[in-house]
Image (cartoon, rainbow, N blue to C red):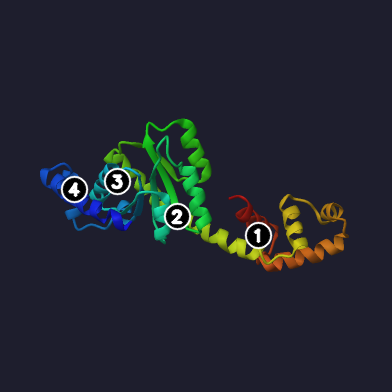
Amino acid sequence: MIQHIGEIAAAGIAATKELTAGSFPAAIGGLAAAEPASAAQKLHVHVVDRETAMRARTFRMMTSLGVHCEIYGSIDEMIAFRPSEGIVLMHEYADGESVTAAIAKLRDSGLALSVAGCSEQPGVARVVAAMKAGALDYLALPFDRAALEATFRTLAEEDGDFRRMHAERILAASRVKRLSGREREVLDLVATGRSNKEIGRAMGISPRTVEIHRTKMMAKLGATNATDVVRNWYLVTQV
């Protein structure tokens, strides 16, 4: 990100000129008014775009909305910086890295950051792939200021849900790792709705032994009922 400081400074100067010229009159009134910060202004956005001019343009748009914005040339560069919060806004190019691949890299790196994609005339297949991978949204370029601000309000809410779910996944994963091999087998079978007798037949053990494994498994998961068991299983398997 260090090499982009000059870009940020240049973008800031350009944004000042645009605001002075009246390009964003609504922004002047909104930022000058002593009102509570909007959802957009509370956001921390990490813009990932390989093109310098596009990074600067997006930076100007974000700052005009009062969004705290940082820019990167690639998802790898952003991961190396290891931000602890915020939403990643990634510009997806047809001949470049996909949003889906970026989400996988973030997950593998252990960063709990939600992602939104954007591109010029995004195709249905690209958008569907990104959303299936876990993207919060997919935006069309060029950005429409009013639409972008409305989107940010939604993203702020969804990002909070994403971070809570990520924390729950981490906790569930740490609990499941404590299970023995047999206890994990019981967990997988309980999650499919099988009874102790059915589990016993599948594992070649008695229902009484299944009950012993099940009791230990539930204690390690902090589960008090079958619903708690299934939730822990879901959190670690449905990634």
Pointer 4: what residue?
A: 15
Report, in whole angstroms, how far the alpha carbon at label 3 lies from the one at label 4: 13 Å
Q: Say if residue 186 shows up in the picture.
A: yes
What residue is disc 1 on? 228
Image side of residue 189 versus residue 76, left or right? right
Cα–Cα span, label 2 and label 1: 26 Å
Residue underneath mark 3: 55
Residue type at mark 1 is: Asp
Secondary structure found at label 2: loop
The x, y position of residue 26, in whole percent, is 19, 45
Residue in the image at 26% along x and 56% along y: 5
Q: Image height check: is 71 above or below 146?
A: below
What's the residue at 19%, 58% (across, down)? Answer: 34
Of pointers 3 and 4, the one earlier in the residue sequence: 4
Task: Report how far apart the C-alphas of labels 2 and 3 lie in the structure.
Answer: 19 Å
Numbered mark located on residue 113 in the image: 2
Q: CA distance from mark 4 to mark 2?
A: 27 Å
Displayed quadrant of residue 181: bottom right
- Establish if 128 lies above or below 17: above
